[in-house]
Amino acid sequence: MKLCLTAFTAVILAGNVFGQQHINELLIIGDGLTKNAPVPELGWNCNRGMAATSEDKDYAHRLFALVKTVSPNAVLTLDNIMYEDTMTGWVHLVPNSADVIIIQLGDNYQGGISPEEYQKAYRQMIEELRGGSARTVICIGPWSNGKIEPYIAGAALTAGAKFVSLRAIAQDPANLASADGVYPKLAVRPGNRGMKLIAEAVWNALSEKSSK
């Protein structure tokens, strides 16, 4: 199964799929799973993908490490939108210079707008981030907020982006932070193994997109 690829296998796959193609800039727009400032009351005093035990173990930096196997000079940019619950506030990201854009949002949606409005705004964001160019966009589904996943998937489909669901990864207890035993108050977030599988799932989607 694709989600079970090891990092080594993923690197071999990358060599076969990407060939001479290069990625200049990888832009990842996400929530706390991508990067979270310290929250001392949760025992979190770091500034990386929440619950990863080191920066190189969060999914964003694992994914970037895979990108650098084919594009050694690539740069990584991490950012967010201002209001995730209403899917607004990405003006600071337009225009951008990234040729690959990863969007990881959804877990902070709490009904600020209807799911249909959320989907419409999400699609608009994809289109504005692209700016009329043929950039690759990968949309990651939520880790735990399953009710909004179909709408994110729908936005990705209609905008011609690739969608990656995290549902199977999140359902395996071995992929949770509780398995690492480092951040007990963040037990249900992705742990190191979960982060690794997220990175590999996105990498596989990116490889498939690039091979078409």
Image (cartoon, helix red, strand yellow):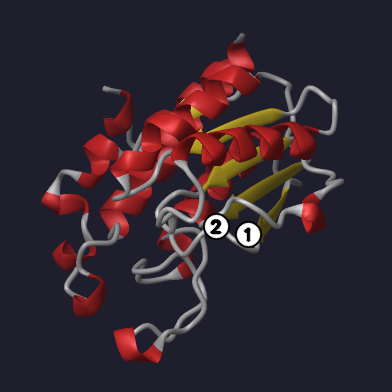
Residue 8 seen anywhere in this rendered image of the structure: no
Residue labelled with disc 1: 80
Q: Is residue 88 left or right of residue 180?
A: right
Residue 11 x, y percent position in the rendering: 48, 32
For marks 1 and 2, give the CA distance: 9 Å
Q: Is residue 89 left or right of residue 117?
A: right
Q: Residue at x 23, y 35 (%)?
A: 168
Kindly check if marks 1 and 2 are in contact, taking CB atoms under 8 A apart as contact.
yes
Q: Is residue 198 left or right of residue 126?
A: left
Q: Amino acid at mark 1?
A: Asn
Q: Residue at x 50, y 59 (%)?
A: 34
Residue labelled with disc 2: 84
Q: Amino acid at mark 2?
A: Glu
Camera-side residue: 71 or 101? 101
Residue 50 x, y percent position in the rendering: 40, 68
Classify the position of the C terminus by image quarter. top right
Q: Quadrant of residue 157?
A: top right
Residue 100 x, y percent position in the rendering: 69, 36
Residue 86 x, y percent position in the rendering: 56, 54
Q: Residue at x 68, y 28 (%)?
A: 136
